[in-house]
Amino acid sequence: VFRTSLSVLMRRRPPSPTLVPYTTLFRSFSIFYGGMVCIAGVLGNKQVALGPLSALGPLVGLGPLAVEAGIFAFLLLVVTSSAMAELHGRSIANRLVQIGFVPLIVSILLSFIVHALPAAPEMQPANRDAIQLVLGGTWRIWLGGIVAYGISQTLNVTIFAALKGREGGGLLWLRAGIASMLSQIVDTLLFVTIAFAGVFPIGELLAGQMIVKVVLSALLVPPLIYVFVGLGKRLDRHA
């Protein structure tokens, strides 16, 4: 009788919150998130002009504004973690950020190893020199990337969750935009300072990158957050 009663109670027990990270949503977002972490470092080797936005620089005493292309992948990281926080809370979103350290560190180690390996003699010199340039970051750039990623992405989740606690479920676009803008300012400050302080004057670089990232966050994150939250709800229904 005792065993039968215990079996009934166990069947009636509600699902444990710890099972949430292993849903289809978490697995899918983790794969996407890890991919964006890796590709951001590759994209960051190219500076891109921003059309009309580039003209904002001269208005504030700077040159024409440009941004490293990795920002587009990082904004997708911001949107992904914010969507997870919206659907399953701050702790699950922070777990996603922590998982991101794995592909980030592994990709850095692989870049270091491949850079050190000799190129095949038949490789085109132009291709060889280009890939060596892409893979040949200094230890300060690697360190800056790790520190800036961890702090800025955690800050994004923290701000987003705090605003949700204050505003409730409304104003999703505003909460996501504010969290992204503030976290990207911190990301730029940390990365540029760690990677380049003392190498050359960084004031103009900091100002330009902050302006561009704030503008892009305001333009891109609000519409994207609705796409990712909608996708997350659909994945949850099919878990």
Image: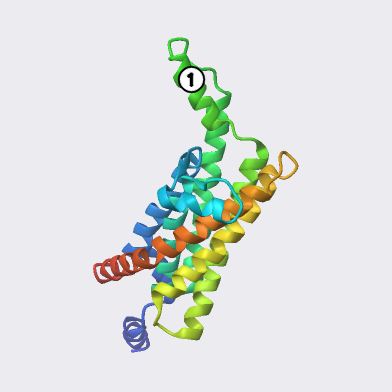
In this orientation, which residue lies closer to the viewer: 161 or 7? 161
- 69 is higher (above) or lower (below) than 229: above
In this orientation, which residue lies closer to the viewer: 78 or 5? 78
Residue 59 point in image, percent of width and height:
55, 55
- 218 is higher (above) or lower (below) than 111: below
The answer to whether residue 151 is seen in the rendering is no
Q: Residues within 10 Å of mark 1 (few under 14, many from 20)?
A: some
Q: Amino acid at mark 1?
A: Arg
The answer to whether residue 235 is seen in the rendering is yes
Residue at (29% x, 71% y) in the render: 233
Residue at (55% x, 51% y) in the render: 58
- Left or right: residue 139 compared with residue 133: right
In this orientation, which residue lies closer to the viewer: 208 or 41? 208
- 169 is higher (above) or lower (below) than 96: below
Q: Quadrant of the C terminus?
A: bottom left
Residue 193 point in image, percent of width and height:
68, 49
Q: Quadrant of the N terminus?
A: bottom left
Residue 202 point in image, percent of width and height:
68, 47
Res 33 → quadrant = bottom left
Residue at (39% x, 70% y) in the render: 20
- Residue that label 1 marks: 128
Residue 35 point in image, percent of width and height:
41, 48
